[in-house]
Image (cartoon, rainbow, N blue to C red):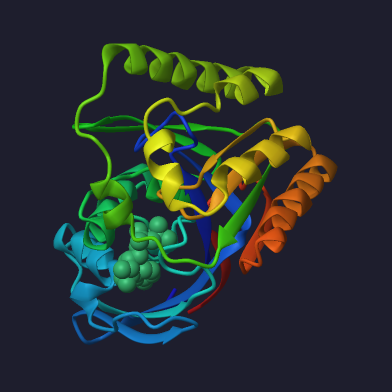
Amino acid sequence: MNEIKLFAPGTIANLSCGFDVLGLCLDNVGDEMIIRKSKQKGVRITKIVGANLPLETEKNVAGAAALALLENSETDLGFEIEIYKKIKAGSGIGSSAASAAGAVFGINELLGRPFSNKELVYFAMQGEKLASGSTHADNVAPALLGGFALVRSYNPLDIIKIKSPDHLFASVIHPQIELKTSDARSILKKNISLKSAIVQWGNVGGLIAGLYTNDYELIGRSLHDEIIEPARSILIPAFDLVKKSALKSGALGVGISGSGPSIFALSKGEDTTQKVAKIMCEEYDKIDLPYEIHVSKINDEGIKVLNSKS
Ligand code: ADP
């Protein structure tokens, strides 16, 4: 195989209670990438369509992640990467993660799969470090593995993939303001109280139990964020109103997608999800704020190969 075309999915990280340790993979929201072998060693980003992002390998998360993989490989080959951006950078839907995950997945396929998808998470994280200054895995892990991903431990890296309950869908609204992950991180306090920690880990456990047992009510009860949301939600226009209306329309739970500004809701069944999405849009229509809305089932596969050439 000389060339591969991929769908690199968007992701929702944190999922309310799981700051830096939980994320899910979206199905119809994502970028496309073409990766091809080249005789010239190293990694070159040859084309970016749909966004104004750096072409320099070291400054683009796709390039940084690809270089991390190649440092651990013995290949003499080089690679060219084309990125067709659909997820806006700074949206909170894992734009940088899609590129990082897509790059390492594609190169691994072209090399004949020397690494497992779980091993690829480590390389993709090196791309995320460039975007946000921290090597977090809660977007790249679900992008590479599909479904839900839990980062049980960062050191050593221990990632658990959890299949999504069949009827779980996400609505994600992206108000058209840019919020940099690095800025959204800088407002967080470094220490939390034991009381808050108890509430938070109770909910993380509840969410995982709900996912394994297909208990939608338990999933909904557990989508609560005691620590990050109270601090960050002030950066997101009309967050409380959008959340209240979405819950009233039947959403199981609502929270900040990644570091924002996107807001996500999880719902049972596509009809309820569409209804929830509509009400979220109405809240932003009321204040004349432009937005993008996405409705997606949970993608259990992760990155998808669209075609390949030999
Ligand atoms: P998101 O949460 O949507 O990924 P971030 O703020 O974490 O947004 O990351 C976006 C940052 O990463 C921007 O500063 C952007 O310029 C940088 N970046 C570098 N390469 C890419 C890429 N291929 N895709 C998206 N963002 C990239």
Q: In percent of the image, x 55 and y 21: which residue is there?
A: 222
Q: Position of residue 175 (x, y in %)?
A: 56, 62
Q: Quadrant of the N terminus?
A: bottom left
Q: Position of residue 251 (x, y in %)?
A: 71, 35
Residue 241 visible: yes
Residue 288 drawn above or below residue 80: above
Q: How many marks?
A: 0
Q: Is residue 62 visible?
A: no
Q: Residue 61, percent across and down?
A: 29, 67
Q: Quadrant of ligand 1?
A: bottom left
Q: Residue furthest front?
A: 287
* Residue at (42, 15) in percent of width and height: 199
The residue at the point 61 percent across, 24 percent down is: 219
Residue 201: image quadrant is: top left
User: Considering only vertical position in the picture, is 264 above or below 123?
Assistant: above
Closer to the camera in the image, 1 or 167: 167
Is residue 32 or residue 111 the one in the foreground?
Answer: 32
- Seen from the viewer's position, the closer of residues 75 and 183 is 183
At 42% from the left and 51% from the top, the residue drawn is 235
Q: Nearer the viewer, residue 55 or 115?
A: 55
Judge whether 228 appears above or below 96 on screen: above
Residue 113 horizontal side relative to residue 156, left or right: right
> In this rendering, would 228 be left or right of 78?
right
Which percent across, then down, holds residue 45? 31, 82
Residue 10 sits above or below residue 58 on the image: above
